[in-house]
Every structure is written in C-alpha cells, then in structure tokens.
C-alpha cells in the first residue's frame, strides 16, 4: 500500500500546485479589478470566496497527507490529525456549496421568472451575498462536528492505518455519513443541475425569439451569455464526474471499511483544479490575460518548448 499512497501523495502535490496557482491568479485579478472599480460585484465576491476555500482545502489536505507520510506511527497523537481531517471535510462542504451558489447566481442574473414570490426570494439572497459566503463555511463546520460523536478512530493496527481518520462503524455513523453526503455532494449538485437547465432553456427561448425577429437573416450572437452557459455546463459536468467517483469512494469506506481516504482527497484536489480552470475560461478577461502571460513566458523561455 505504501507505493500507492506515495504515488497519490506525489500526484496530489502536483494538483496542489495547479490549484493554488489558478485560484491565486483569479484572486489577484479580482483584487486588481477592485482597485480599478472600487467595488466588487456579487459574482466576484462568490468567486473570491470559492478561491479562498479551494486554496485552504488544498493546503490543509496536502499538509495532512504529508504528515501522514512522515509520521506513519501517528506519534503526534490522533487529535491533531482528527482536527485536520474534520477541517478538510468542512472545507469540502464550503467548496461544493460555493460552486453551486455561483451557478445559482448566474441563473438569477440570466433567467427572468414571472413568479413574484420567487423573484423576491432571489433578490433577498442577492442583497446578502457577503453574508451567505460567510455562513456557508460556518454551516460546513457545524455539519462536520457530529463526526466526533458518531464516528470512531480506525483501530487498524497494520501499517496501512492513516492518522486521525474517523470511521462510520456504527449504525448511527452510517446514517450520518449518508446525511453528510446528501448535504455536501447531492444537494449542491441538484441545485447546479437545476440552475444549468434553467439557463439553457432561457437562452434557447431567447435564441428562438432573436431568430424570429430577424426572420433568420443572420445568426444571432449571444456573446457573454453563451460563455456563461458554457462555464455553467462545464461546472456541472466536472461536478457530476467528481460526484460519481466520490460517492463510490465513500461507499467503499463506509460499507467495506476500506482505508482509501487518501484517494478521496486526491479526487477532491483534482476537482478544485478543474473548477478553477473552468472559472478562468468563463471570464473572458481572465482567460485573455492568462493566455497572454503564458505566451509571453513561452516566448522568453525557449527551453520550455523542448
């Protein structure tokens, strides 16, 4: 098992570099935009919160994996490692709900609904975006705290044991594990799919009306709306792929008690990297700056082409 864990540690390290790089790039560009405009839009606030959560999750996750590799006998004690594992689960909750909140925001901005009550609820949420992005990590922390009560430390005495890992080895623990997966993976995923479908239907109707108004004389251009749709679709696709893999890994951990939590952390790291890349592509200004800087780097460093 050691070679496999070591390989996952190395691969997660590579993903950690890309995750931190892409999310830091987004944050720096957002701060630069704030200095120019002297304000942050609601979408920029959500994206900034998501980037901070991505970076925090990646750093804590890789720190735990590194300590688990170095301290294979868990000489530092179980409590510090358990705290790190709970923090990783909490940050995962934050990342998932920040992503779904961003998709929900774009659906509100692009889709007009005739339901006045629903519109009022949406407007209320948009007025308190900053409060929402602060409440999400608090909810994540509160959701993960019961693990200390219903989960138990892994009593495996073999060298395969990971430090601080909590196992749902009781009926109450398994019930809580299902509830946690519903709150962390499935519910935000359903919200993202619903919002993506709403955006797609809205743009399809809008496109049909534009074609009717021009009698099909020329193809209508959607511009930024189409780019937002592509970004939302990409976020949903990335999330669904991650959801399937994560549910399978959690099933193996919960039902078969397999010690593969490192694999779960690796796939979450891959998800944060992919999400950051999609966010950069979704905003044309960020994508252009990244491509320009990359081309400049390749032009100044011919050895990179080898």
Image: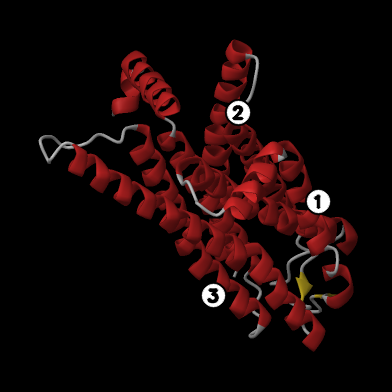
**Residue 177 sits above or below residue 19 on the image:** below
The quarter of the image holding the C terminus is top left
The residue at which mark 3 appears reads as 248
- Image spot of residue 101 (x, y percent): 60, 49
Mark nearer the N terminus (1 vs 3): 1
**Residue 204 sits above or below residue 18 on the image:** below
Where is residue 252, by image quadrant? bottom right
- Image spot of residue 227 (x, y percent): 36, 38
Labels 2, 1: front one: 2
Q: Nearer the viewer, residue 198 or 19?
A: 198
The residue at which mark 2 appears reads as 41
Residue 73 placement, left or right of 264:
right
Q: Nearer the viewer, residue 47 or 196?
A: 196
Q: Residue at x 75, y 62 (%)?
A: 72
The residue at which mark 1 appears reads as 138
Are the two marked residues, 1 and 3, in contact with CB atoms closer than 8 angstroms? no
């Amino acid at each position: 098992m050691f070679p496999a864990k070591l390989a996952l540690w190395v691969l997660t390290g590579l993903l950690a570099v890309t995750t931190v790089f892409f999310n830091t790039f987004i944050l720096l560009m957002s701060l630069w935009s704030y200095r120019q405009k002297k304000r942050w839009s609601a979408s920029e606030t959500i994206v900034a919160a998501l980037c901070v959560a991505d970076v925090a999750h990646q750093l804590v996750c890789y720190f735990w994996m590194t300590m688990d590799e170095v301290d294979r006998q868990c000489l530092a004690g179980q409590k510090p490692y358990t705290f790190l594992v709970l923090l990783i689960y909490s940050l995962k909750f934050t990342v998932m709900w920040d992503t779904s909140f961003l998709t929900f925001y774009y659906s509100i901005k692009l889709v007009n609904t005739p339901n006045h009550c629903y519109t009022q609820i949406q407007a209320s949420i948009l007025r308190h975006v900053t409060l929402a992005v602060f409440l999400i990590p608090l909810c994540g922390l509160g959701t993960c705290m019961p693990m200390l009560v219903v989960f138990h430390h892994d009593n495996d005495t073999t060298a395969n044991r990971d430090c601080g890992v909590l196992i749902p080895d009781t009926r109450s623990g398994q019930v809580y594990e299902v509830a946690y997966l519903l709150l962390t993976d499935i519910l935000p995923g359903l919200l993202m799919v619903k919002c993506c479908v709403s955006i797609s239907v809205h743009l399809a109707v809008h496109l049909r009306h534009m074609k009717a108004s021009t009698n099909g004389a020329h193809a209508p251009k959607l511009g930024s709306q189409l780019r937002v749709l592509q970004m939302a679709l990409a976020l949903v696709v990335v999330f669904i792929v991650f959801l399937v893999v994560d549910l399978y890994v959690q099933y193996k951990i919960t039902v078969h008690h397999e010690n593969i939590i490192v694999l779960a952390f690796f796939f979450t790291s891959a998800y944060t990297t992919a999400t950051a890349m999609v966010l950069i592509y979704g905003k044309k200004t960020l994508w252009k700056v990244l491509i320009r800087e990359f081309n400049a780097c390749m032009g100044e460093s011919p050895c990179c082409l080898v």
